[in-house]
Image (spheres, rainbow, N blue to C red):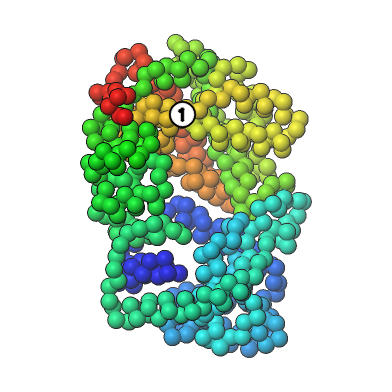
Amino acid sequence: MRGRQCPGSLYLLKTHPEFRSSPSAAGQNLFRQGHRVGKLAWNLFPDGLDLSPANFSDLHAWAARTEDSLKTSSVNFYEAAFLKNGMFCAADILHKENDSYSIYEVKSSTSLYEHYIEDAAVQYFILKHCGISLKNISIIYINREYQRGQTLDLKKLFRIESVLNEAESIQGEINNEMAFLQNMLETGKKPEFKIGPHCMSPRECDFKNYCWKDIPSPSVFEIAGMNYQERFALYDNGIINYSDFNDDALNQLTPSQKIQIVSGRSRKDYIQTNSLQEFINELQYPLHFLDFECMMQPVPEIIGAKPYQHIPFQYSLHIIASPDSSAAHKEFLADETTPDPRHEWILNLLDDINENGKILAYNASYETMILRMIADAFPELKRRIETLLPRFTDLALPFRKKYIYKPEMKGSFSIKNVLPAIFPDLKGYEHLNIADGLSAMNAFLGLREDIKNPSNPAVRKDLLEYCRMDTLAMVKILGYIQKILKNEKIPSERISNSESE
């Protein structure tokens, strides 16, 4: 599957594994989720033999144990391994029916993607070469509409869909690609390397940093509002740096993208004072700066929850009572032993927020979405929660719409990019042990899974520091905007509207 995405990636894995990037937090989380979901799905085919090896690198021993186990009276096998002519695969679930078998591949996703079918087709190809008679091959994946009851109903949690016809239809393609890849590895012939959209699809390649090492920054790959196909269309036409844009190419961009290019080339900030003033005029004190942290689980633990539903467990709240006031801070972090943290979470939040004044969030659609979900979950609080919704203002808006743009933002309006761009000397997220929302979610889930861990107090402290940093960053960002409008601090020369057009 790696070679199918990019032969160069497979070549590098075999010849230069040292160039491979370490898995990201997101990648590690997906792996853990997939492993847990896979083992849970075994219960759909109970009383099977677990063929997982003690040493995953000894493929021959793994395959030999599988071959011996298939001779027993068992009908279900987990992690059955097959090895033939240098081709290896392990089936999540192998089910025996008379003298033939069915494969079930388990995915923690809520959708059936094309590359899952391709993966199944590769397994089909290898098992056929091993002389295994296959009756069917199916994908087991998560039913997004499943709602947890008092007990977990695996038959409703999982969907099972046969992909036999699709897998059989591309066997010729798999055969040709397998022969090409085997020849490449046996001869040591280096394939042609060319970056492209395949570097990110179906998943980002872990050799991307190596293959992209000569791409400058800034480049067309940092232009906001473009997909990778559009960026590569520019790249393939020789437009890589911002300086490569001629008038014709520049005129193909949106006004927002033009601002990014012109600002990047001139190294000047772009500021739309009138739009900023209109944004500020809408604010009403007391100002509340609010940020949520949520967890998502493919297998819901909470009664009434669905797979991957956002379950809030933490918030940070800075409040500025008046223009002359300093910010006061309030926060909440659920006890990891609480089965459902939502009720206590929302009660504390409702008590901490004043009855009037604006509520600022960064990408406020997320916070309002969470509140609507909580209102539906707790009807007795619905009216109180809904009074909060009209009070929200999105602090990301001035940056998304480029009322303010600095070249250091590199096309992003993420708070993680905006904060260091406007406060380069500020000690921000980089010093935190938990520095992003995914890491926060994983940390809290880790606490729930191991409540006796002696490091719990330290992890909870890290969680509080991270969430507090998000709302403190918003306080500082708004202060920066207010200073600009008072002409107290203009970091660098402005670009007028006419210069960006």
**Residue 316 relative to residue 137: left or right:** left
Residue at 39% of width from left, 21% of height from top? 481
Q: Helix, strand, or loop for circle 1?
A: helix
Residue at 60% of width from left, 39% of height from top? 312
Answer above or below: position of 273 versus 296. Answer: above
Residue at 26% of width from left, 55% of height from top? 213
Residue occupied by mark 1: 397
Say which of 229 and 149 sits in front: 229
Amino acid found under the numbered disc labelled 1: Leu
Work out whether residue 285 can be spotted: yes
Say which of 42 and 418 sits in front: 418
The quarter of the image holding the C terminus is top left
Answer above or below: position of 4 versus 230. Answer: below
Residue 244 spot, x, y in % from top left: 23, 44
Residue 159 spot, x, y in % from top left: 67, 62
**Residue 23 relative to residue 336: left or right:** left
Answer above or below: position of 477 versus 436. Answer: above
Residue 354 spot, x, y in % from top left: 60, 18
The quarter of the image holding the N terminus is bottom left
Say which of 255 and 196 sits in front: 255
Residue at 61% of width from left, 74% of height from top? 165
Q: Quadrant of residue 104?
A: bottom right
